[in-house]
Amino acid sequence: MPVTESPPIAIQAHGLRKSFRVKKQAVEAVSGLDLIVAAGQIFGFLGPNGAGKTTTLRILTTLLPADAGTAFVAGADVVRSPQQVRSRIGYVGQLGGADGSATGVENLLLQARLYGMTAAAAAGRAKELIELFDLGAFAGRVVRTYSGGQRRRLEVALGILHHPQVLFLDEPSTGLDPQNRANLWDQIRQLRDDGTTVFLTTHYLDEADQLSDRLAIVDHGRVIAEGTPAQLKQRYSGDTIVLTPTGPPDSLPPLERELAGIPFVRSTRIQDGSIRLAVTDATPSMAAVFGALADRGIGISAASLAQPSLDDVFLHETGRSLRDAGAPGGGPATDRQAGEQVPA
Amino acid sequence: MTFALQSGLFFRRKLLETLRQPVWIITGLSTPLLYLALFEPLLRSVAGSPSLPAGHVLDVFVPGILALVAFGAGMGAGWVVIWELDSGVIERLRVTPASRFALLLGTVLRDVAMFVLPGIVVIGIAVGFGFDAHWAGLALMFVLLALFAAACSATSSALGIQLKQIGSLAAVVTGVQLPLTLLSGILLPLSLGPDWLRVLGHLNPMYYTVQAARDLAAGTVTATAVGTGFLVTGAAAALAMWWGTRSYQRAMT
């Protein structure tokens, strides 16, 4: 196994495969997935519902045996040394996992004892986490009575209780309101800053974009693109300048041809009475484009910079939009919430 | 040591869960008492055959009721397991290094407790009504029926994990409950029935449990049926626990 000295590797998977039988038909949820995640970063795993995200996560967390392939997590083999992996990772599943019939404190104490802490150490750690996640007002109540946000805070606290090297989060912000979502993001960043590797699956474009240090885009059970959010967007789409000239519509095609010759402009397109220029780097190309327009005395009624999104990357790789992908029936039943709308 | 500690922790968790839902404790107690109050008078009026001698109806009937309590206490486990699968509790616990057998055992021990406590109450009340108590035999009978409750509990957990749906579990449990209990001679001794019914009864593991329980309650500790009963019930419990642990190892929503 190739291991580089720096940075250390938190997750390494090679050739992972897993298929399920759905209505007597084998459906491959993960098909030859390779992955390397360096330690100490937030790694996003972005893809539509049914792309194999949850299945991959379950293989990496020892919940599900792969049909083929190898995976090392936090330095241990998930197949040969599952107990070692378990003691080094934390996991917050899509379903949550807090025990509804126990109180928050009881949930924390049990979890701590299961990781081998003494009763005294468990009590101390529970107290710390209650403070850190601001659970004090309700920690003594039975979890069933919690709001969605309160419950999620407890569940993240359960996931990081034993200071795991790698924390797995499966669709962590599903069902949270914007306030709770922002808090969760802050907590995840804090964990990363404290040295924890965070591996999170999401089908939210903005979550993958804003939260991840690096990310992999998955579709049909394999990684189709991997890099930092900025790299990915740059590599596949760059920035887009949208210009609306004051002239008549038939003046657009010749103008488009002229603008296509400017350095930095990669491609041009006319859409809805505007010219869209895909450029490699917005700042120098804006100057070049406006300079060219001024030289020719062409008036502009509107100009804007369209931010490239990860959806452009997905579109480029798969020919379809992430917003439309993963429609009901698009994947095996192992990924929950199939058919859920992907917000912009 | 870790295993014993984890089993204790899971047992405590399950006990707290039960104490928070007193409705289970109430029905756990009221069902056997209703049998005593409503069914025993019926039996009394049909008694008089060699297998159900008049004047000893309670002696035959009480072990049967206790077997029913054990069955009921164990078979409830699967419902909670499905709920725990759906809320991700089992998934979370499976990512910890906790022993899967300990996880199963926590529920099994709670269910055994939920048989023993109402069982003692039932004996106390039955003695008041004229039940002839042989204490050494009764103590052994509680051990036997505790094993039986454990077998039911582990089976129910395994079924819950395999079936994943409350509806399917309910169909299976209610489907097997009637033939299993009738063919064990819990309510009426099978010796009252025709030959073919007795042959069917011998295919039912629960039959041996109930036969042994009757002998133990009557104080004939050395009866062959007692040995057979412990053997069959013990084997069923071991098999069920193996199945339950295996199911926990692979539990998936």
Image (cartoon, coloured by chain):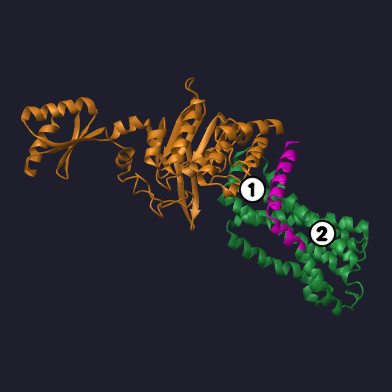
Chain colours: A orange, B green
Magenta stretch prevailing secondary structure: helix
> Can residue A21 be seen in this snapshot?
yes
- Where is B141 relative to B109, above or below? below
Single out the residue that lies furthest toward the top: A5
Sequence-wise, the earlier of marks 1 and 2 is: 2
- Where is A2 relative to B159, above or below? above
Identity of the amino acid at label 1?
Answer: Tyr
Q: Secondary structure at mark 2?
A: helix
Residue A321 is left or right of residue A24, and the answer is left
Residue A145 is left or right of residue A36, and the answer is right
Q: Which residue in the structure is indicated by mark 2?
A: B119
Q: Nearer the viewer, mark 1 or mark 2?
A: 2
For mark 1, name the chain.
Answer: B
Residue B12 is left or right of residue A186, and the answer is right
Magenta residues span B1-29
Q: Quadrant of residue B122?
A: bottom right
> Do circles 1 and 2 both sit on a common chain?
yes
Q: Secondary structure at mark 1?
A: helix
Q: Nearer the viewer, residue B116 or A269?
A: B116
Label disc, if present, on residue B248 of the rendered structure: 1
Q: Is residue B142 magenta?
A: no
For mark 2, name the chain.
Answer: B
* Residue A128, position as x, y percentages in the image: 60, 31
